[in-house]
Image (cartoon, grey):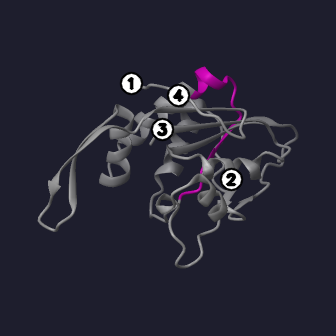
């Protein structure tokens, strides 16, 4: 799978995102319901992610997981375990959890889905994607992440936090603020499939 890896900066030790999500999008008019339509071209990673999240094509998971594992290995070196970003929307199957499982399987390391917990937004609160600035997103995330200290072994390891889409970085930074003090984490790495 073709990638165009970009470094992302934040309160983590090293971060990457594999490719831009949308390469071009041209307005083509409105449909019969009055909604705008677009002719959209996505990167290979972006298209695979779109097919997974919006078309329910779960066959994309092994391809995306393999691409993310390969990039993580070449950019970060040794990784001890994977932590998926908690999803924003509740679904019967969570794409980011299955992506984390695929990365963990490819790297032969554990995945801790319960380590990072995100509380739902207050009733009536706008979704993060509807907020304009990074500062508004940071304020909306205040106090919503918690850490479950579930590792009982002695020692510390390099942890990889994975997500599907990287936008402003507000969610990733909020998560890393909670994970950073955990004494089982040596270096904190982040990787996402695509950026907006």
Determine whether, in the image, residue 153 is placed left or right of residue 175.
Answer: right
Q: Nearer the viewer, residue 47 or 183?
A: 47
Task: Quickly name the residue at label 4.
Answer: 6
Q: CA distance from mark 1 to mark 4?
A: 13 Å
**Residue 141 makes an appearance in the image:** yes
Q: Which residues are magenta?
A: 72-87
Quadrant in which the C terminus is drawn: top left
Q: Nearer the viewer, residue 66 or 130?
A: 130
Above or below, comparing residue 138 to residue 183 in the picture: below
* Secondary structure under the numbered disc 3 in the rendered image: strand
Q: Please report whichever mark, 4 or 3, sits nearer to the chain's N-terminal start.
A: 4
Q: CA distance from mark 4 to mark 3?
A: 10 Å
Task: Quickly name the residue at label 3.
Answer: 193
Quadrant in which the N terminus is drawn: top left
Residue lying at 88% horizontally and 40% vertically, measured from the top left: 154
Which of the 4 image quarters holds residue 15?
Answer: top right
Which of the 4 image quarters holds residue 36?
Answer: bottom left
**Residue 58 makes an appearance in the image:** no
Task: Quickly name the residue at label 1.
Answer: 2
Foreground disc of the pair 2, 1: 2
Q: Nearer the viewer, residue 15 or 114?
A: 15
Q: CA distance from mark 2 to mark 1?
A: 30 Å
The 10 Å Cα crowd at callout 4, few under 14, some 14 to 19, many 20 or more, is some
Determine whether, in the image, residue 49 is placed left or right of residue 125.
Answer: left
Mark number, residue 98: none
């Amino acid at each position: 799978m073709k990638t165009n890896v970009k470094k992302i900066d934040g309160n983590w030790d090293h971060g990457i995102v594999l490719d831009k999500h949308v390469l071009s999008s041209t307005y083509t008019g409105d449909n019969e319901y009055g909604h705008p339509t677009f002719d959209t071209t996505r990167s290979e990673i972006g298209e695979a992610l779109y097919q997974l999240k919006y078309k329910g094509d779960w066959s994309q998971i092994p391809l995306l997981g393999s691409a993310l594992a390969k990039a993580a290995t070449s950019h970060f070196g040794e990784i001890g375990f994977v932590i998926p970003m908690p999803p924003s929307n509740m679904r019967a199957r969570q794409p980011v959890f299955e992506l984390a499982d695929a990365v963990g399987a490819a790297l032969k390391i554990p995945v801790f889905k319960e380590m990072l917990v995100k509380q739902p937004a207050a009733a009536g609160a706008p979704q993060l994607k509807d907020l304009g600035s990074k500062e508004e997103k940071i304020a909306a995330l205040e106090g919503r992440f918690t850490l479950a200290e579930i590792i009982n072994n002695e020692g510390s390891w390099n942890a990889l936090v994975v997500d599907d889409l990287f936008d402003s970085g507000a969610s990733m930074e909020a998560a890393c603020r909670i994970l950073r003090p955990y004494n089982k984490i040596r270096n904190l790495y982040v990787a996402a499939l695509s950026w907006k």
